[in-house]
Amino acid sequence: MSKSRIARISLLLAAIGLNAAPAFIGTAHAQEKDKAAAAAAEAAKQDTVRPDLFKLVDPAVIKPLMDAKNYAEVESRIKQGEALPTLSAYESFVLNRLRVALGSATNNQPMMTAGLAAVIESGKLSDKERGDFIQALATTYYNNKDYANAIVWFNRYAKESGDAAKNRQHVLRSYYFNNDFATAKAELQKDLAAKQQSNTAPSMEELQLLANIGAKSKDPATYLVAMENLVKYYPTDDYWLDLLSRTQGKATYSTRFALDVFRLEKAAVSKMAPEEYTEMAELALLAGFPTEAKKAMDAGYAQGVLGTGPNADKHRKVRDQANRQAADDTKNIASGEASAKKSKDGTGLVNLGYAYVTMEQFDKGIDLIQQGIAKGGLKNAEDAKLRLGVSYALAGKKDEAIKTLETVTGTDGRNDLARYWILWVNRPATAAK
């Protein structure tokens, strides 16, 4: 028997008061009339068991039997007690308490749950005791994977105790494990809405449950909402990678944002896959941002994932190309400013500005991007706004980044990326890289 199982049994035995002796009507010599009358009146107030039953369930006898694991003898005594004629309510109550203890000790779940239910309905418990027994019964059903009954008894505990929060997560999980995903989702969304209203962060467990509900019920929208909130409140590399992967999997996603996805991934996670560093570098070279390519390769080498293995030669070639072009770009970038400003549209200014951003000359780069957007004539003006928002984010200009990114529109992945950059900008301090 596991230690946790033993611990649960110990708690349950304590709760049911195995060592508490039932009141017993014994024989007594006749006493003076007034004392006898007083004693009789007092006895009438008490719940009692007959001598024949007491001999069977006397704690002084039962406890050694339980300690010796002589469960067959204890069960025999319960059956003998049940066979007595015309059991009183209290006598049935005593036998059911003993049945709970025996069922728990022997892992006889039907015996234990039947005993618990009978004790709860006996009317012999205080409010606190009844609450303890209801909690024990609900937990027993839950541990036995009888989730339908667990829901019934957890909800009854909430109603009678007034404490709905205590078992709320067990109720939600019971709906989930019982494959009632619709109810689990609806109930969980109520809780999340209430927390949002009170400006309280949802727990990681709640969001993980919502993600599982979305996955099990084949509801990608619900899954994405859960992942976005996990990234918002409890960011990890795995959550970020899952979120970005799911975004790229949308039917409306445009592959032209592949480099933009890598940019966010590089900022958000501690380590990328080796092929992602090289692919990001190659895409950056094609886009005309060799310094960005160099930084991607430098990061991969610094992480120890590039320069080794069967692709080491490819890594070296991409790094050499990035280094060479980055050096040329740094040397000649200023010469492109005049021609960009003379251009009929702002595309050149936007690209030149972002090149400066990759060199960490943020103020100059941001100014040029703004000039390019103002000049107009852009093929994808929303792309330029995304680039500007990302530049503010990388520059550490949080307010400007959020203000810009909130205006980015599009259903092809651009709006998703803008929202996710806002999540990165607002990341918890402990998640900052």
Image (cartoon, helix red, strand yellow):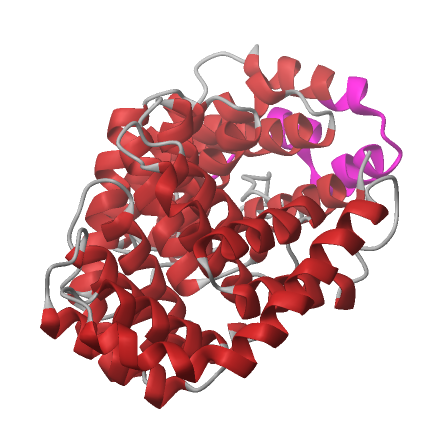
The residue under the point 47% across, 34% down is: 137
Give the side of residue 419 with respect to residue 379, left or right. Answer: right
State the image coordinates of residue 377 (x, y, percent, origin top left). Answer: 11, 59
Q: For residue 67: magenta?
A: yes
State the image coordinates of residue 29 (x, y, percent, origin top left). Answer: 59, 45
State the image coordinates of residue 1 (x, y, percent, origin top left). Answer: 82, 33
Q: For residue 1: magenta?
A: no
Q: What type of secondary structure mainly makes up the magenta span?
A: helix
Number of callouts in the render? Answer: 0
What is the quadrant of residue 384 in the picture? bottom left
Q: Is residue 39 visible?
A: no
106, above or below 364, in the image? above
The residue under the point 43% across, 51% down is: 261
Give the side of residue 278 with respect to residue 89, left or right. Answer: right
Give the side of residue 338 with respect to residue 294, left or right. Answer: left
136, above or below 380, in the image? above
In this view of the protein, which residue sits in the foreground, 253 or 399?
A: 253
State the image coordinates of residue 311 (x, y, percent, origin top left). Answer: 81, 42
Give the side of residue 237 with respect to residue 44, left or right. Answer: right
In this view of the protein, which residue sits in the foreground, 408 or 68?
A: 408
The residue under the point 64% across, 13% down is: 79
The residue under the point 32% across, 37% down is: 254
In this view of the protein, which residue sits in the foreground, 143 or 275?
A: 275
What is the quadrant of residue 176 in the picture? top left
Provide the residue span drawn in magenta.
48-74
